[in-house]
Image: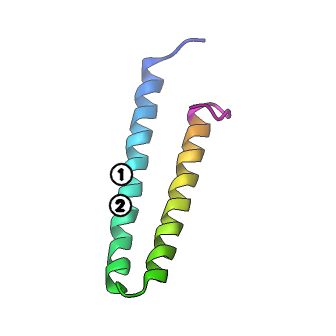
Amino acid sequence: MEIYIWQQLTDLGAAMLLGIVCGTVYDLLRPVRLRRRHSRALTHLVDAVFVLLALLGIFLFALRIGQGEFRL
């Protein structure tokens, strides 16, 4: 099994894009969290939704990189 440089660069770009998307979504959720600062339940709910979406994205990314196998 060979490792191609082009594939590694593509995977690196995809990982960077995933990080940018996660950071952007978190920044977009910040005004919701700050507007309802006294509502801890809403803050926890928004954070939980973000974490679940980020975990799903990372899981799907790992499956794509691992060609269908979950490998770290």
Residue carrying label 2: 24
**Marks 2 and 1 in Cβ contact (< 8 Å):** yes
Is 51 left, or right, of 66 in this rendering?
Answer: left
Q: Residue at x 42, y 86 (%)?
A: 39
Considering only vertical position in the picture, is 23 above or below 30?
A: above
| Position in image of residue 59 (x %, y %) | 58, 46
- The tag on residue 20 is 1
Of the 4 image quadrants, the one containing the C terminus is: top right
Q: CA distance from mark 2 to mark 1?
A: 6 Å
| Position in image of residue 61 (x %, y %) | 55, 42
Q: Number of labelled discs?
A: 2
Tag 2: amino acid: Thr
Judge whether residue 30 is colored magenta: no
Q: Residue at x 43, y 23 (%)?
A: 6
Is 46 left, or right, of 13 in this rendering?
Answer: right
Judge whether residue 70 is colored magenta: yes
How would you rate the neighbour count of disc 1 (Cα within 10 Å): few for under 14, some for 14-19, many for 20 or more? few
How would you rate the neighbour count of disc 2 (Cα within 10 Å): few for under 14, some for 14-19, many for 20 or more? few
Q: Tell me the SS state at disc 1.
A: helix
Tag 1: amino acid: Ile
Q: Residue at x 35, y 61 (%)?
A: 24
| Position in image of residue 8 (x %, y %) | 44, 25
What is the magenta range? 65-72
Is 45 left, or right, of 12 in this rendering?
Answer: right
Residue 52 location, quadrant? bottom right
Q: Is residue 21 or residue 7 the one in the foreground?
A: 21
Q: Is residue 13 or residue 44 the one in the foreground?
A: 44
